[in-house]
Amino acid sequence: MEVMNKKRKKVFITDFDNTLYDWLDGWYKAIDKALVLFETKSGLTRDELVPEIRKIHTKYGTTEYENLFHELTCFIPRFKSADEFYAICDEAKKIRNESKFVNLQSYPSVKETLIKIKKAGAKVVVFTESEASSTCGRINALGFNGLIDVVYSADPKNEIFDACGTPYRFFEGVFHPKPCPENLLKIIDEIGVNKEDCVYCGDNMFKDVAMAKSAGVDDIFAKYGSDIFRQKKIERPFLDSITFWSDEMLKKEFLLYQNAPTPSYTLNNSFDEIFNYFVFDEVKSLVK
Ligand SMILES: [Mg+2]
């Protein structure tokens, strides 16, 4: 009878990084391992490297830029030769790539919950702002193929990536970053359902929750994956030190947190708390 108090939904739309798995932890482990190798072999310190790394991330607008080490060319005079520099870069890149998808695990109950939603006949859609190559690799590594009906992300531009076992769609033209509601509304329109049939879940209050609210879609806050629990950890200050975000953006984020919207539904400890609030029903067609 408890079902009577729950909302019925047909499409579950979710953020990916830090909502379905711990992106920050995986990202940190991979870059830290590569940096330790680079530091050991080059004699350069992290304090010297961090400001230069941040410049490169800012140039490319990502903290996952693959050829990061190869572009630290300002340090070449510190090496015996350019060849020695590039050999160490190759090693660092390799170790980072190898670590990136190793030991990745989804948050507890994520897979079981997605399976249950799909068994009910509802659809699961991922909406991420991350690069297609990283997201595809992680979907494969996390064993999510078959659990997600479609992934939406920004146009991959010149990215080259291996085939993903999950259907992938890109927003053509201008990409509206979260919390702009345009892309979420576009997804719902393409799927061909009403907003009322959808619910959107994410770990970031001012991006995910705010976006769903301004789109008029029920919002769920994945608190267990949010920054609220990260401020004291080593990973988050390190990310801030080499992020492509400007100081202004970081400050703005902090201020926004002071005025973050109040989530309509909150998953405090685990993903399967979704079923405390929602029941999922069958939907016939996914895409128009
Ligand atoms: Mg996220």
Image (spheres, helix red, strand yellow):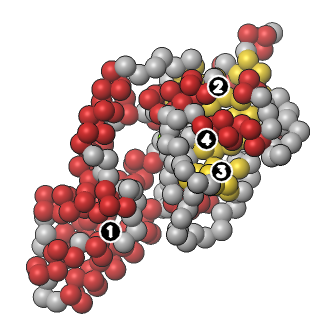
Residue position marked by numbered label 1 in the rendering:
68
Horizontal side, residue 268 vs residue 46: left or right? right
SS at mark 3? strand
Q: Say whether disc 1 or disc 4 marks the residue closer to the N-terminus.
A: 1
Q: Is residue 92 above or below residue 108?
A: below
Q: Amino acid at mark 4?
A: Asn
Closer to the camera: disc 1 or disc 2? 2
Horizontal side, residue 11 vs residue 53: left or right? right
Q: Say whether disc 1 or disc 2 marks the residue closer to the N-terminus.
A: 1
The N terminus lies in quadrant: top right
Q: Amino acid at mark 3?
A: Val
Q: Residue at x 65, y 68 (%)?
A: 163
Q: Mark 1: few, some, or many residues within 10 Å (few <14, many ≥20)? A: some
Residue 101 rendering spot, x and y as whole percentages: 49, 61
Disc 2 under 8 Å from ligand 1? The reply is: no
Residue position marked by numbered label 4 in the rendering:
183
Q: Residue at x 89, y 39 (%)?
A: 284
Q: Residue at x 54, y 49 (%)?
A: 175
Q: Residue at x 33, y 33 (%)?
A: 253
